[in-house]
Image (cartoon, grey):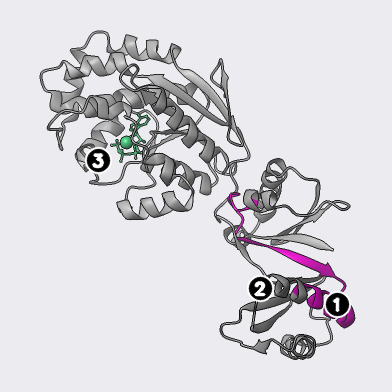
Amino acid sequence: MQVLIIRVDEIGLKNKNKMFFMHKLKDNIQSKISQNFIFKVNNNRIYLIPQQNMGITVKDIDILKKIFGIHSFSIAEKTESNIDSIKTQVYKVAKKSLENNNYKTFKISVNRANKSFPYNSQEFAGIIGEFILNNFPQLKVDLNHPELNIEIDIRKEGTFIFNNRLEGPSGLPVGTSSKGTVLLSGGIDSPIATLLMMRRGMLLNAVNFYSPPFTGPKSLNKILKIGSIVSEFTSFPFYLYVVPLTKIQLLFRDIKEDKYSVILQRRAMMRITNKISDITNTKVLVSGESLGQVASQTIENLLTISDSSQKVVLRPLIGFTKNETIKLSKKFGLYETSILPYEDSCSVFLPSKPATKSNINHIKSIEDSLPHLSELEKEVLDEAKKYKIEDSKVSEIDHFES
Ligand code: ATP
Ligand code: MG
């Protein structure tokens, strides 16, 4: 019988509340995966047993690769823990992989978690190794770099035989670490900041600012595409709110000290995002800033930006190099979309010499001199477009979802 074995890493280190995390992970897998599997949570593992004659599909595999909390998983043959049925299944696994690959070397790895099994792991690896040599004369033993590694995992609940370990994204299940609102641009950084917080178990919604008519429909499509990719990593709907910032940006463009316009925009974004966070009941904000990357990301400017937020702003990329972020962006399948050349809201009104330092009181006095600022910030909230994205399907909705 074929089963999927799901393994965890960090969750396994937890003591008293391990089962809470294991069951959350199970729920997240269950709501994401389409098929009818029977789920069994067993200490550090989850088994997925396909019902009746439904097999395990490529789509199932793709889904599991994107569920946070999963360290690795294997498609295994499960059998009783006796030598004859183990041999039968090992033969089957070896034969199948030799049909598809021209392997010359192999290794048998035995893990005997069930100590009542009559052979120790080394003895048993020897027995099965010989069995393979007798049945597949084209194979030779190579303990260091085998092309075919057949693992035999002997447990109380049965014996599992497999020759594959697929990588999961690790971390904690989404929904185990409270809620946050991410400021999501179409760039490289903030989508990665989003996934890194999701990987720590946080449930996120997102706010994007755009500048119609200066940014066109392609920019909107781009952010929806980013949202779609992100949505594949969570078992919950991903809500994305798109707020037109143009009126406010025009206000800042016309001030005398335009070198502060980016800082002023960021502070306005923070205040508006705080409001959305209040309405949708999230506890913290998340942004993709990284120390020193651009003028607005010096410590002085980050402090001036944070000052406008009542809620704590988490910046998971603060110590990342750009290359590290790009690497993750490629790994998570976002890069190709993030580098599409459509204008971002901020780049439309970039001053020629943005200030690398700012004084909070001075910035506040500029804001105070703009009488309509807080009115406009309320107004644009009403003009926000609201989207619900589930398994990369986008639908427009008419309210903020809490
Ligand atoms: P990113 O790659 O995420 O766009 P960046 O390197 O371009 O980041 P900035 O443009 O300085 O850096 O933006 C810093 C952070 O501010 C972003 O990571 C994001 O969290 C937020 N932000 C910037 N522009 C927008 C926007 N148009 N909508 C929502 N959030 C934004
Ligand atoms: Mg950007």
Q: Earlier in the sequence, mark 2 or mark 1?
A: 1
**Element class at badge 2:** loop
**Image location of residue 160, percent across then percent down:** 77, 70
Does the closest atom of ligand 1 sit within 8 Å of the Cβ of label 2? no
Q: Which residue is mark 3?
A: 297
Q: Is residue 30 above or below residue 344?
A: below
**Dot in front, 2 or 1:** 2
The question of residue 189 being in magenta is answered with: no
Q: Which mark is residue 296?
A: none
Question: From this viewpoint, is residue 203 visible?
Answer: no
**Dot in front, 3 or 1:** 1
**Image location of residue 287, percent across then percent down:** 38, 38
Q: Earlier in the sequence, mark 2 or mark 3?
A: 2
Left or right of 31? Residue 167 is left
Q: Earlier in the sequence, mark 3 or mark 1?
A: 1
- Going by the numbered disc 1, the residue's amino acid type is Thr
**Element class at badge 1:** helix
Left or right of 363? Residue 24 is right
The question of residue 89 being in magenta is answered with: yes
Residue at (61% x, 88% y) in the render? 142
Label 1 near label 3: C-beta < 8 Å? no
Q: Which residue is mark 1?
A: 88
Does the closest atom of ligand 1 sit within 8 Å of the Cβ of label 1? no
Does the closest atom of ligand 1 sit within 8 Å of the Cβ of label 3? yes
- Callout 3 crowding tier (Cα within 10 Å): few <14, some 14–19, many ≥20: some
Q: Which residues are magenta?
A: 64-93
- Quarter of the image that includes the C terminus: top right
Whole-angstrom CA distance, mark 3 to mark 1, is 61 Å
**Dot in front, 2 or 3:** 2
Q: Nearer the viewer, residue 210 or 141?
A: 141
Q: Which residue is mark 2?
A: 101
Q: Nearer the viewer, residue 268 or 332?
A: 332
